[in-house]
Amino acid sequence: MTGLNVYYYVKEGMMQSFVDELDKNCIAEQCIKETGCLQYDYFISKESPDSVLLLIERWQNAEAQKIHTTQPHFKLLQELKAKYVEKTEFFNYSECK
């Protein structure tokens, strides 16, 4: 299994619009339907609710996650990030079996 924790640092005053766009475009719902996707969840930071959105992704393997980056909804997410997100941090992890 492989996973990512992705921190989106959202532009000031844009969190609700970003979340609304994610929901309107069913980004999470489309991702969770992908082959090999085990989890795709967004969480708003309790400490910084107006600026930090955490995405937790878990995939059966790195290949499934790589294929995810070729999907149309992933490309749409990149467009939304360009509009709403100031900075993104990625943390990769793998679990031992």
Image (spheres, rainbow, N blue to C red):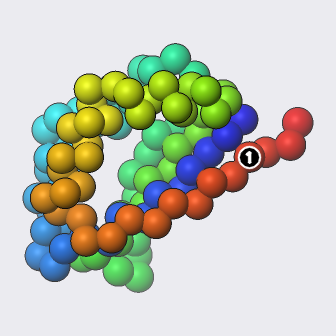
- The mark tally for this picture is 1
Q: Position of residue 83 (x, y in %)?
A: 13, 58
In the displayed structure image, the side of residue 93 where residue 67 appears, left or right: left
Closest to the observer: 57 or 68?
A: 68
Q: Position of residue 95 (x, y in %)?
A: 79, 45
Q: Residue furthest top?
A: 35
In the displayed structure image, the side of residue 37 where residue 75 appears, left or right: left
Mark 1: which amino acid? Ser
Q: Position of residue 93 (x, y in %)?
A: 69, 52
Q: Residue furthest bottom?
A: 47
- Relative to 39, say whether 48 is above or below: below
Q: Secondary structure at mark 1?
A: strand
- Relative to 10, say whether 62 is above or below: above
Q: Position of residue 94 (x, y in %)?
A: 74, 46
Q: Residue at x 88, y 36 (%)?
A: 97
- Would you say residue 12 is visible in this rendering? yes
Q: Quadrant of residue 87?
A: bottom left
- Would you say residue 37 is visible in this rendering? no
Closest to the observer: 79 or 41?
A: 79
Crowding at dot 1, Cα within 10 Å, few <14 / some 14-19 / many 20+, comes out as few
- Relative to 4, say whether 40 is above or below: above
Q: Residue at x 46, y 66 (%)?
A: 89
In the displayed structure image, the side of residue 21 where residue 29 appears, left or right: right
Closest to the observer: 84 or 70?
A: 70
Q: Residue at x 66, y 28 (%)?
A: 60
Closest to the observer: 83 or 58?
A: 83
Q: Which residue is mark 1?
A: 94
Location of the N terminus by quadrant is top right
